[in-house]
Amino acid sequence: MGQQLERDAIRGYSYFIIVILAVIQGIVITATTDYSIRLESQLSATTLYLPILLAIFVPSAISYLITNAKSAIFYLNIAVIIGLIFWLNYWHAQDFLNSSDTDPFFAFITLTVLLFFILPWMQSWQTTKTWKIDYGCLMGLYIKNTFLGILASIIGGLLTLIVKIASFLFGIVNLTFLSEALDNDVIYWVSFALGFNVSLAFLRTALNVQLSNFVSFIARFFLPLLNIVAVIFLGGFVVSFFSGLTSAGLGSAVMLWFLILNLIFINFVYGDGTTQYQFRAGLNGFVLISIMLLNAFSVLSLYGILVRVNQYSWSVERLYAFTIALFLFVLVFAYSIAIIYKKSAWMSYLGPINKAGILSLIAIILVINSPIADFKRITLNSILAGIENGKIKVNSSLAYDLKQLGEKGQQAFEKLNNNPEYQKLFQTSPYEEEQRRSLKSVLIQAQNSPAIPESWFDLGENLSSAWYCTSQYDPYPCVGFMADVNQNNQDDVVMCYSYPSSSSIDCNIWQQTEQTWELMDTQTRSFNTMKEKDQAWDNLLKGNYRLKPKEWLMIDPTF
């Protein structure tokens, strides 16, 4: 599959640099993952997680790139990576007012994806001194980097496990000092960092496995399988659409993952197109048609996302999903044009299409992490427009969403909160109306029982265990009746509930006082079989029960 990859030649002194950086990496990760240290550091929101991002990505990138520590291109590559880390950390943390609210998740994911796509270009630049790279070589580097990263992670994990086992064994034979010295987070992280980085550099020089051909053989089985799934799905979709049957949902996220999986296997099978691989006569045409049918998946994904936007508004997550869907749509459409134009020889265009796609993806990632396409700003404007036209409900969930959009989102929340009407709505939960029903509407009153007083229902949220009955999702069956449980010539309210698959019945008993109703007792009755429980439940519904003295006395810790 394209140009063969040679082993990397790494100078001996480079290992010394890798070892030093791995030790620093382990120490910094240990320190920055300790909450108490982060709290005491008093670092600002934009610098709190910068050390750990630098510690994770810089030594790892060096282990992937280093061949000759005297190379100017090597240092330029590392400088670019450090610059990206500084910028992405600042971009994702700038809107947090308090360092305790800072979340490095998006910065970490963005850096991981960005460096995954950039590293092969940097590796090729160091080797060939030019940015012109054969797509077969580029694809081989993506596969090789992924494989070596997984293998190095396993080796780092094994080294850490050995240290853990050694600590345990030393403790058994009373070598307490050695045991306690090894049983330390710093030692564990340093062990993993050393195992990962040193093995990664070593494997680059020692391992010359041509993985491209291997994954191509595997993909030749899975690609037609995915094509069959795609055809069956689209056939079912067409039948459902024209027959008027409702679909279970839009499933845009699943469709996007399905598209990505198809594109990965397409590239594994055809590589850079130089081999002109063809499936068997009948199967080859089916595969090509199925690739063109992927356009339907990309269109449906875009449609599903836009439907959600129309129902609610843009969100940061929907903007990311829309960007990915739009990128995949363009890529699949380009594949389709190549198939229509070149038919069975279409794979000769794969290299130029994919190289342009990768460079475009890198540019897109940089653009959406800059003021040019500020997803938080776009989301905020969309939410405010949705509030104005009544499409978005104002509640506590909206207040949380606004505060998560940084300083401008906080300012928008404070401005809306100055409105007395919005201020009250911001205190309401979105689940109160959507997931809760009134107890009176769901409580079954037992036969032959006096009516339960309205004053008891008026307690609302203060009724213990009422949530089991009023939940919109999987509510318990509940029965209520009046009974003089404590034999004081005054009826009490009894509410019983039971989960359908449970073999027990729980009952709560309220007694009326001068001011309100007070929960006086809770009782649980367990049964040997579900049949016995169901019979007892039917008896309660019919009002058939007996009041028996308790066999056990109540424990009273007061004197």
Image (tube, rainbow, N blue to C red):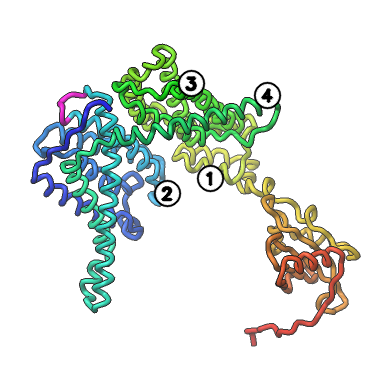
Label 3 neighbour load within 10 Å: few <14, some 14-19, many 20+: some
The residue at 29%/36% (across/down) is: 143
Can residue 127 be found in the magenta stretch?
Answer: yes
Q: CA distance from mark 2 to mark 1?
A: 12 Å
Query: Which residue is label 3 attached to?
Result: 289
Q: Are marks 4 and 2 in contact (CB under 8 Å)?
A: no
Label 1, label 3: how far apart the Cα atoms are: 46 Å
Q: CA distance from mark 4 to mark 2?
A: 49 Å
Identify residue for label 4. Answer: 242
Magenta segment, which residues? 126-131
| Residue 541 spot, x, y in % from top left | 84, 63
The mark that comes first in sequence, 1 or 4, is 4
Tell me the mark number nearer the camera, choosing from 2 and 3.
3
Q: Is residue 554 above or below residue 439?
A: below
Is residue 315 located in the magenta-colored stretch of the structure? no
- CB-based contact (under 8 Å), mark 1 and mark 4: no
Q: Secondary structure at mark 3?
A: helix
User: Which residue in the structure is indicated by mark 2?
Assistant: 101
Please report whichever mark, 4 or 2, sits nearer to the chain's N-terminal start. 2
Please state the horizontal and vertical placement of residue 171, each as a whole percent of the image: 26, 75
In percent of width and height, residue 423 lies at 61, 44
From this view, report whether residue 148 is shown above or below residue 265: below
Residue in view at x 63 percent, y 38 percent: 393
Instruction: Find numbered disc 4 in the image and state the secondary structure of the residue it sits on.
Output: helix
Name the residue type under label 3.
Answer: Ile
User: Crowding at label 4, few (<14), some or many (≥20) Cα neighbours within 10 Å?
Assistant: few
On the rendered image, what quadrant is the C terminus found in? Answer: bottom right
Q: Residue 400 bears which disc, if any?
A: 1
At label 1, counting other C-alpha atoms closer than 10 Å, the crowd grade (few under 14, some 14-19, many 20 or more) is: some
Give me the C-alpha separation between circle 2 and circle 3. Answer: 49 Å
**Which image quadrant for residue 549?**
bottom right
In-front residue for pair 34/356: 356
